[in-house]
Image (cartoon, rainbow, N blue to C red):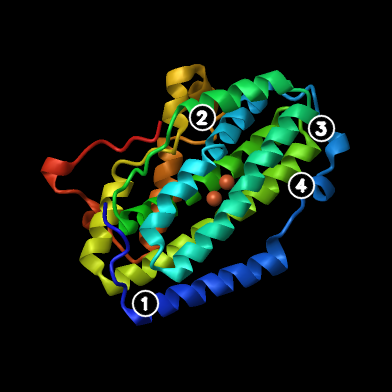
Amino acid sequence: MEHTPHICPELEQSLWVLYRDFFDKAEKKRRWRIREDVPWSQCNPNLDPAVADVVETFCAVELYLPDYTSKILPLVRQSKGRAWFYANWGYEESKHSLVLNDWLLKSKHRTDEQMADLEKMVYTHEWNLPQDSQLGMLAYAMVQEQATFLNYRNLKVRCHELGGDPALERILGFVSVDEAAHYGFFFDCFALFLKFDREASLAALRRVLNNFNMPAIHDLLDAGRSRIAKVKDLQIFDQDIFYRNVYLPIITRLGLTRKELRSPVQERKSMRVN
Ligand SMILES: [Fe+2]
Ligand SMILES: [Fe+2]
């Protein structure tokens, strides 16, 4: 596995500036507290159970945090900007699993025993890096955070339509803003790499965009196939949404064309997001 190669000092300096800016903005505008900032008394036990099933799925994805952080840090440890980012990112992602867990319990959509079973199931699977280089993981993270942002934002809309839950809607608002900020940081980093090494960056992005899967959901699928069907039924995320709201905006913002993103024929695989 490729560890962070010696990044040129100017690129590393730019990455560090991006991180400091990201962190300072997060401290000023984006910090929220699980106990104080969610209207917990307004949880809705009568909300459509399909929404709670999706919340449980997203909670499970967030529970893979130990694998995410422990496997990515060795790849970026020579880049202070990216390593410090992941330390802060881990804190923010840990809040996501905590707050979703709390909502499932307080809204009475799940019991303590059910949550314990979910954790047990998650920890029997190990998540592995979907890309084997730091640049591949940067491209993956950029795409995945934007997809995650859309998943949460669309779930918030469905939640409102299917009975409403002021607590969950507030939570999904906080979490989706965090995910959008993560996407923004990875996007800015990737744009720097694209300027620095265009060919390698394009190759990394091509591999990710042409084979994208949401993390961990597939592992859960093995344990319960109905989960992903729930996400599909609520039309929270699908191939069309991926193409319109992830693929196109990313390549357009990077100033790339679809032609540049096309894989050589022998490597081409169908785009999979489900
Ligand atoms: Fe998250
Ligand atoms: Fe995130």
Position of 163 relative to 249 (above/below): above
Residue that lies at the very extreme toward the right in this rendered image: 41
| Residue under pointer 3 | 43
Residue found 57% across the figure and 29% down from its top: 57
Q: Nearer the viewer, residue 113 or 238?
A: 113
Residue found 39% across the figure and 45% down from its top: 243
Q: Earlier in the sequence, mark 1 or mark 3?
A: 1
Three-letter amino acid code of the residue under disc 2: Tyr
Left or right position of 64 against 155: left
| Residue under pointer 2 | 123
Occupied quadrant, residue 82: bottom left
**Disc 2 secondary structure class:** helix
**Disc 1 secondary structure class:** helix
**Disc 3 secondary structure class:** loop
Q: Earlier in the sequence, mark 2 or mark 4?
A: 4
| Residue under pointer 1 | 11
Three-letter amino acid code of the residue under disc 1: Leu
Occupied quadrant, residue 112: top right
Report how far apart the C-alphas of labels 3 and 4 lie in the structure: 14 Å
